[in-house]
Amino acid sequence: MPGLYIKSEYDVRSLVDNIGNGEIGLPKLQRAFIWPSKKVRDLFDSMYKGYPVGNLMLWKERRPIDYRPIGYNQQQNSPSLLILDGQQRLTSLFAVVKGKEVLRDNLRKELIKIAFDPLKEEFKVADASTTRSSFFINNISDYFTCPEGNHEFINSYLENLSSKHDLSDNEKRKIASSLNKLWALTSYSFTAIVLDADIEEEEAAEIFVRVNSKGIVLKQADFILTLLSIHWDEGRAQIEEFCSNALINNGRTSPFNYFINPTPDQLLRVIVGYGFKRARLKYIYQILLGKDLETGEITIENRNAQFEIYKIAQSKTLNDQTWHDFLTCISSAGYLCKNMISSENTLLYCYALYLIGKYEYNVSNRDLHEVMKQWFFMSSITRRYTSSPESQFEKDISILPAYKTPSEFVNALSKRCDVELTNDFWSVKLPNELITTSTTSPAFCAYQAALVILDAKALFSDIKVSTLLNPATSANRSIEKHHLFPKEYLNRIGISDDRRRNQVANLTLVWWSVNMDILDKSPSSYIEQVSFKPSSEDLELHALPDEWVNLEYDEFLDKRRFQMANVIREAYEMIQK
């Protein structure tokens, strides 16, 4: 780009100071901070060792433009430099050197704590071990922000460490040298490519996408959000606001729910799935650019037309009432909380199908509710959207009838459920799916949902499973997964392998106080001691075979898996009616 940029050198201190006073900011086309703390640690470790950590790309901006601050709740002036490439590194540096909170991509604020052992010259993400250690500075932000300066901090650190450990003179010199070297990171120099102020916003966005399209730095969703920032910034703000409000129970109508904390890229998948009947976001980016996928021609007319389709789809996707009507389908299928959702992709693609049924086939609320709870149950238990979810969703779109009548939509989904859930699935595949220790496996989540649908009580209690699983009505510890053959009991009889002891077929749902009473007793012993005796119906719903307390452990597991599968089938057939 000759003539479009210059190269400049910036040290870390000037960069973080300029971020703090508002001279450097983020254009709205940038994404949120996504680096995990371990990558922040690696950045400081690389800089400390003198390794290159890449160049920056900045954009001079003399005109008023929408931007957002770096970090959380920073009071900033209108910036003169905007970051196109290097946001994650600069946000990391600003957060640690200035000791400021960052706003994560899940819209939660966080203080990043990086620990440093100056004797070993080791960086770690702060945890319990670094807190206990007198050698680690548990948060190097305390060092960089020490009001008395680095020399006073070093003296204080050495004095405190010497009171707990006998340090040789060489060790003291090593520690002082390491801390001075750490302080010198504020002088670490970055080369920045600075784009000229005359570059238009759309051209800057194109440069941003091209720079970040190599490797796996950005996902396709980030490119689409970039286009929204340029052509419909209000739309991007709506998505981010929806995600933020989904986390907060403010007692008013909002997207808040107990199933998923949606991210912008997840909502994009629903929007384009409903609006464009596509799941592969790379095509949507090209479409929103105005590209004709057949001819390859890009025109403003195409772009405007496609954006109108997108805007309508987003408006309906982000409608609070529609969102909660759909989530009611999920709870009616027995799934009551986030811990029971084994695949968020399943929930999202089901929402896209719900929108298609509601707005394009005009299915009544009642019929749509019935077929979608059936579809979600089937999709969840069969792992439908777990492997190659994009391909599977587009296959599902292809089975929808061309004649857009309500009955055609309902019949198409119902028939596909029948095709997937055969007798062999219930009698062979599902019991085998229950050979697992994962309590978040689709099969075990479906079993919990079945107990909700069948209105079962928690074992050894008169409290309903639905009451204990519902996060809106229960406390955090209301329900526990009890080992029917307790682990310590199994250990005493020679079964110590957790892959056998923690099988989900050895688990049942009980009220937490009951679990405390049972502890490590044998089944035949504690079954006589529990105060609430289960009825034959309770035992049947909890898939407990006759005389189960006297069975050999492995025989018990085999029999219970088949009975759990039968309970799940009974629940599914109930929601089919």
Image: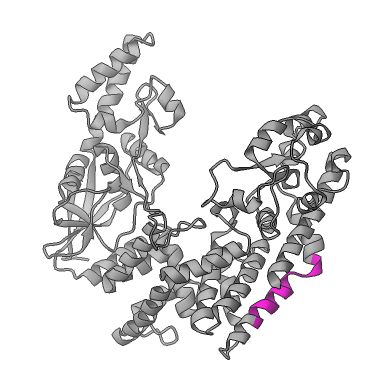
Q: Is residue 414 above or below residue 524?
A: below
State yes or no: residue 499 in magenta: no
- Residue at the spot 64% in from the left edge and 36% down from the top edge: 513
Q: Position of residue 135 (x, y in %)?
A: 38, 20
Left or right: 181 as drawn, with respect to 45:
left
State yes or no: residue 419 in magenta: yes
Question: Magenta part of the protein: which range?
Answer: 411-424
- Residue at the spot 36% in from the left edge and 65% down from the top edge: 239
- Residue at the spot 31% in from the left edge and 20% down from the top edge: 175
Q: Is residue 117 visible?
A: yes
- Residue at the spot 72% in from the left edge and 33% down from the top edge: 518
Q: Position of residue 16 (x, y in %)?
A: 21, 43
Q: Position of residue 29 (x, y in %)?
A: 29, 64
Tell me which corner region of the image, top left, top right, bottom left or bottom right, holds residue 41. Answer: top left
Q: Is residue 166 above or below residue 399?
A: above
Q: Is residue 484 above or below residue 83?
A: above
Image quadrant holding the N terminus, namely bottom left
Q: How is the image coloured?
A: one colour
Left or right: 23 as drawn, with respect to 430:
left
Is the magenta region chiefly helix, strand or loop? helix
Q: Observer-nearest residue: 161 or 525?
A: 525
Q: Observer-nearest residue: 41 or 103?
A: 103
Q: Position of residue 300 (x, y in %)?
A: 29, 84
Residue most extreme to the left: 62
